[in-house]
Amino acid sequence: MNADNRLRSQAGHSVLLHVTDFCHYLYVAAPIGFTQQHLAGFRGFLEAKLQNGLDPAIARVQILLRENLYGFRGNQQSPYIKIDVTDPKLIPRLRGLIEHGDANYLTMWPAGDGGIMTFDAIQYVMRFMVDTGISGMSWVEVPAGEYHLVDRRERLSNCQIEAKVHFKNLIAHPSEREYQRMAPLRILSFDIECAGRKGIFPEAHQDPVIQIANMITKYGESKPFIRNVFTLGSCASIVNTHVLAYNDEGKMLLGWSKFLRQADPDVIIGYNIANFDFPYLLDRAKYLKLVEFPYWTRLRNVKSEPKDSNFSSKQMGNRDTKATNTDGRLQLDLLQLVQRDYQLRSYTLNSVSAHFLGEQKEDVHHSMITELHNGTADSRRRLAVYCLKDAYLPQRLMDKLMCLVNYTEMARVTGVPFNYLLSRGQQIKFISQLYRKAKEQKLVVPNLLQQNGEEQYEGATVIEPERGYYDVPIATLDFASLYPSIMQAHNLCYTTLVKKEICDRLGLQKDIDYEITPNGDRFVKSHRRRGMVPLILEALLGARKKAKADLKKATDPFEKAVLNGRQLALKISANSVYGITGATVGKLPCLQIASSVTGYGRQMIMRTREEVEKRYTIANGYTHDAKVIYGDTDSVMVKFGPKDLSTAMELGKDAAEFVSQKFVTPIKLEFEKVYFPYLLINKKRYAGLYWTNTEKHDKMDSKGIETVRRDNCRLVQVCIETVLRRLLIDQDVEGAQTCAFPPLIDGAGLVY
């Protein structure tokens, strides 16, 4: 079976690599009495069941010693049957046959209600990347003499280089030293304009495409080396822009499609291109019967086609979207990216550009577009400038938000393909890392049936807030990477979870060989088995520490950007591990881990309050009795009493060091900031001036109130911001009350 990899070389050449002889596979636990002598018969039995015509369906069947990921069983390996198929499309059928009991060879597996469990249910592309050690957006080497170039007459792509290689001859380089640099990617940012009818949103079967603006930039360069605009009708010249005017819409669209293939971009970006520009262009070309238009991919005979898609995640909820294939070219829709990563009141290009760039679109209202198009060459020039700006702003946003480099580093860190980062949720990132570590340790991952999602567990502790306005400094103590550090400290993992009967059978001793978590589950200690999840977290957090150290030493701006993106990706990946274990509708749920983590977290928050309030008292020589006024998940707010910032900060640092000693390494409490003054309204609702030094406050910080919430009108936000400024910056309580009420009173009563 072949796997195609489309990439760009260090020299900037586009490459299609045909990787041969890699087979997809799954595992099933061997039944009692199954031996090498049964393999040939079992293979023939499966062939008959799959009925793949004249071609064989099964490439190989073998017995290997492996361990089940779920549960500690004394580090004992068991025999598993590994079944390789000739075509990855056969895996779902094969898995279904086995799991439904229709492939029970010689009835060797005991009949049960749950069927026969299979292991390693992972997509073909991820299986290939895991087994070859390749990560998304990373460098791959094929040594000289280990590949052969494909004859031009047999080529399947438009790439400059096309070659074949056996999968065992691939060398995957880790993203370090010289292999840390980005590829010289060619980035196309584009935008289209349509001549719509008044008051009606453009429809592809009626409204023509009248302009397409394009900018092509090489990664690392700020200015485009190609800047053009395709226009329907004449257009006056534009400085530094190549204007391509057409009298026929069909010819213009075909001209743009040809330009796309010749420019050969690696990345296509824009704003709302996934749901508008891509499908509109393809639907319009279909209506005009332009059969040559949709060939945007790097594969010669593969069309780009828009398809309805649905994205669902806990973070984003359900979203219906369009997905258009551009095989060999990455897509980055800045609208989707900003919606995913930032919480804003408005996601229009104008609002987003104003927020991040301090600039806006050209002053052309959408109602004027058709009128400008129907006017003169000069009016069409004004429209073209507007269209060019709409193509330029996504490029500026991408550079400003550093999303290409940050997503590249996320793909490298987690090992997933780049396109998964926008189209998939958090789970695939952890699953990729887990399978890589499982392969190292010869573990197999069970294909668990999806849970109904009704099973719940107790979450984090929230210490009841002592509501009020505090005109003394409030120190905030935060646990650094709380949930990852708990999983490391207590060796919480799928592989270390142990049942009571196993403890009894193996003679394991409580508190020596295993510990019982606050919610009553048992996990073996690291001398019995070091958990795989703690090892993954250790590697992620260790790599982040190194990336941050390298970032401090780096001088090259591009190297700094890559390193900063890397440390952010490592932080996000480590913090997302806990969520996967508690996701009952996910691939790898383990509520014993999730509930144990929150159980330890609750204990730690309460222990922190107890230790702080016991130590920092007048009886122990301090000026005031300390009081924890609020605590939430991984932080506590402490009123030490002194009115000066420097004393509160010193006490905060001392308390963090003192309390950290009470917990198992690597759990660490850190002093990060002081709020002064501080307004505590309710759980998860507060505001204060944020201080990290005594010279000047860093910012006015707020959580859960109308300044940051997006479900209120702008008037409420402005009013609350004004009140907070009076309250926190001016420390004028009466003035805050005065400015709060006049807008709401209208002589006789409240205005509703």
Image (tube, rainbow, N blue to C red):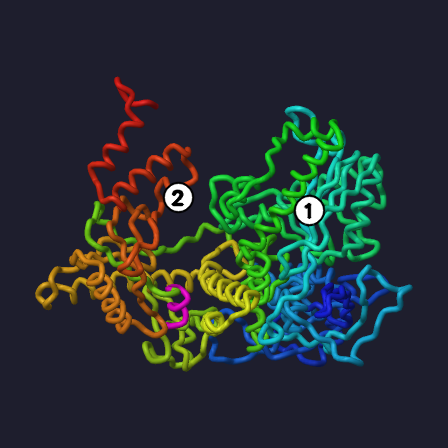
Q: Quadrant of residue 427?
A: bottom right
Which residue sits at x=41%, y=66%?
A: 484
Figure check: 221 above or below 139: above
| Disc 1 crowd, CA 10 A, few/some/many (<14, 14-19, 20+) | many
Q: Which residue is mark 2?
A: 708
* Secondary structure beneath label 1: strand
Q: Quadrant of residue 132?
A: bottom right
> x, y percentage for residue 34?
65, 77
Near-viewer residue (59 or 656) = 656
Quarter of the N terminus within the rendering: bottom right
> Mark 1 or mark 2: which is in front?
1
Quarter of the C terminus within the rendering: top left
User: Relative to 526, is 256 on the left or the right?
Assistant: right
| Disc 2 crowd, CA 10 A, few/some/many (<14, 14-19, 20+) | some
Give the magenta range. Answer: 482-489
Which residue sits at x=57%, y=65%?
A: 558
- In the rendered image, the residue lying farthest to the right is 153
Instruction: Mark yes or no: residue 27 visible.
Output: no
Question: In whole angstroms, how far apart are the C-alphas of marks 1 and 2?
Answer: 32 Å
User: Relative to 402, is 106 on the left or the right?
Assistant: right
Which residue sits at x=27%, y=41%?
A: 726
Give the amino acid at mark 2: Val
Near-viewer residue (400 or 686) = 400
Disc sitting over residue 190 in the figure: 1
